[in-house]
Amino acid sequence: MKNWTKVFEDQNQIRVEIVRGVLEDKGIAAFILNKKETVYQLNGTFEVLVPRDESINALQLIQHEITF
């Protein structure tokens, strides 16, 4: 995990899935880390992680190509 970095975080799983999908469509490997509490899924967030060397490209894509 030390070579991966967080580029997006949200409580809404659908938004996180959209971000992951856009990044993967652009050729950037991405995965979602679920940081919600396991029992009730009320508190916490989901994070999108990418390889550290792709983080700048990923952040630019998120900023310029994704709107909610």
Image: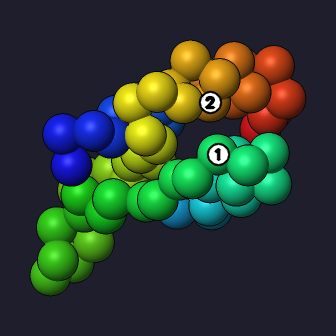
32 above or below 23? below
- Residue 40 seen from this side: yes
Q: Is residue 57 left or right of residue 43?
A: right
Residue at horizontal 43 percent and vertical 59 percent from the top = 32
User: Residue 52's quadrant in the figure?
Assistant: top left
Expressed as whole percent of the image width and height from the top left, the position of residue 11 reads 43, 50
**Residues at marks 1 and 2 touching, judged by CB atoms closer than 8 Å:** yes
Q: Is residue 67 left or right of residue 29?
A: right
48 above or below 53? below
Residue at image mark 2: 58
Residue at image mark 1: 28
Q: Secondary structure at mark 2?
A: helix
4 or 65, which is in the foreground?
Answer: 4
Expressed as whole percent of the image width and height from the top left, the position of residue 20 reads 62, 54
* Rendering colour mode: rainbow
Q: How many marks?
A: 2
- Residue 42 seen from this side: no
Residue at horizontal 48 percent and vertical 35 percent from the top = 8
